[in-house]
Image (cartoon, helix red, strand yellow):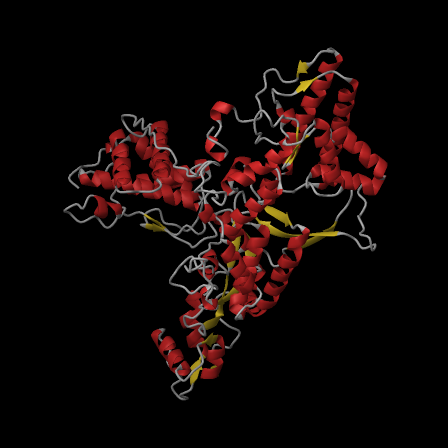
Amino acid sequence: MAEEYVSSDLLDEFINNERIYFSGLRLGINWSDVEWNTKDWLPHRGKHQPLIFKPHTSISKIYNPQKALPEILPQPFQDFCKAMLVYLQRTRTLKFAMVHAYSIALRRLYNLLYLREQSSPLSLKCNDFESILRQMQDDGYKNISDAATHFKVIADSIDRKQLLPVSIGFEHSYKAVSTRHGYSTIHDSDAMEKFRRQDEKLPSREALEAYALCTNSPISDGEEILLRVIDLLIATGQRGNEISVLPLDCWVERPIKNSEGDIILDANGNVVIECGIRYYAEKQFQSRIHWFASQDIPFARRAVERLIVLTKDARAIAKWQESNPGRLWPINPEKKITESEVLNWLGFAKGKDQKRNLFIFLNRKGVARHKDEFNYYNAGEIEKALIGKVSDHVALKEGIGLRAKIILRTSEILAIAFDGQFRFGLRDGNVHRVFPRRVTIADINRALGSEAIYPSIFDRRNKTENDGSPIRMTSHQPRHWRNTIYHLAGLSDVQQALAMGRKKLEQNSTYQHTTIKEDTQQHHNYLSFNSHYERINFFHEKIRSNKIQGDLVSSYNSLKKTHGAAKAEDFLKIHATAFHLTPFGGCTHDFSQAPCPKHLQCWNGCSHLHLTGSQVERSRIESQIMQLEKSIEQLRTEGAGEGGSNKWIEDQERKLDNMKRALERVNISSAVIQVFPMGTPKFVPENKRKRSSVSDE
């Protein structure tokens, strides 16, 4: 480059500080390397990729410069890039995917400097950030909003640390493009009621029916391993990278207890058991338990039990290799072994060319037949040639560098297999029994047909979509499907988030793919009652007959079993009259005014909540307070360690405090009072409502 680097004390100090911090992690990564192997710094469950400090290839497609790009990022930009990545990672606790994204953004910035024959980060200007985004947009880059956000973070970090003589002050107006509400109204006759939001994220009916046939008739042990893993994806709705690292002892059973702590027995006197699987959450890395609904238990139990059996051999080899690092197999290195013995370990497809294929494979690895006996090999030579492909068998770990803690090894994972066990139709006999490994997301997606070049479980059985096109599914579609089922069944947002292992309630809507009719029909049915008493009677009857699901029904049934029918009916009179019937349970808001997406949040400061001061009303609030206090105490006692329990307790304590304050106000006023004068209504106002979801009238 023609430009000479002009030093900046603050920039040099920034780079030096991040270099010292990074060296202190003792990761075995040399700061000056062009490629950083981040497996000990940024462990993740996907395919490992290094961080590369080279110019981004987009410059050749967009700008087509006359001069060839340099092989690596020149100094000082390379050090600036590394220091910025280390700084962002440690201050924002970033995972690999985000560090990689910022790496790409920084490399794109260098591309622009390169065109100006510059290499110093001191030359960066606000216009550079804007120019790159405009060019990316013109080039049809899809995730332009994400890219703009990444550039914004980098620019703000530069300004905050005062690394440049002049602040960048970069701002952007790019917004994420969402198609969530891009569907027709209920009056669109062409759309009918079959139009479903983001339909491509749900498996089709044909795909699920085809999968039902596949999972009950596996063609081989290798295919059955994948089918059982997919069974667990469907049964739980968990993320693929959570199911792929389930521990071997994941299955959990415990007796169900009532509110008094007594074990519940069925009609035959047997203990009622609930079942679940223990897993490690991909986000926030917590050990959690997913509890199954009764109808999911046989399906999930079969999957776990069959995986334990099917992976027994691979697990034994993995355990031996973990106990004997640096070894390939339990064969004396000095021993001569026959071709047949080698083929038992390095299985090649049976046929007349089997031994020839083995010879070619080993010859390419530099292994020749024994010099004295033609059909023999030296075990030590084979081991030396292949040992490099054996993994360290660390399947899951927490922390980085010297502080890293191994959570699970390959032998401790439920879903493992031999290398080559999933080559369906593509040299499917070449199963290398010396290379046990865990099942990956790529294996699952290929089995489901996400990559057309690999034969899927559907292709092997000639199963297609209704229009004759190939069935294509992904490992994440069962999660969308399961969440949509929960939504249609009437689970609240809190219940959906807990069931799906999700921390943010607002993310639920991304996974709820319902039609307009499904979203509104139950509301219309409810509003068709002639009077308030009809609604309450209907509500009570459906609770008694278990036709409604939710906490009210569970509490009613529990009271009926433990305290008798009279107490249970008293419970209905106290609690079930204070709620309007909705598809999701009960709500004190009048649905004739507006639909309410914040179910059961009235005591969280809803301005529509009023009290009349009557004695009956006071009694109901006192009963609610007593019930809530018991529930909070029970969860503190029995729910310790359960994912999301602390959030639930905080929410319920806030409601409890509001109820008690409301009760104090009733004492000093006999008139109708607004409980939360400064509160906000817990429904979407008319002028902010997404009209396309219901009607455009």
Q: Nearer the viewer, residue 661 or 471?
A: 471
Horizontal and vertical percent for residue 330? 53, 74
Residue 248 occupies which quadrant of the picture?
bottom right
Q: Is residue 33 visible?
A: yes
Q: Residue at x 61, y 15 (%)?
A: 677
Q: Is any atom of residue 335 visible in this view?
A: no
Q: Position of residue 352 (x, y in %)?
A: 40, 85
Q: Is residue 543 above or below residue 688?
A: below
Q: How far across and how far down the image is residue 545, in percent?
A: 75, 43
Q: Quadrant of residue 307?
A: bottom right
Residue occupying the point 49% across, 35% down: 693
Residue 223 % position (x, y):
51, 66
Q: Residue drawn 53% across and 49% down? A: 481
Total residue callouts: 0
Q: Quadrant of the N terminus?
A: top left
With respect to residue 43, does 127 lie above or below?
above
Residue 371 is left or right of residue 566, and the answer is left
Say if 431 sits above or below 138 in the image.
Answer: below
Position of 528 with respect to 663 (left or right) is left
Q: Nearer the viewer, residue 646 or 554?
A: 554
Q: Nearer the viewer, residue 651 or 513?
A: 513
Front one among 92 and 471: 471
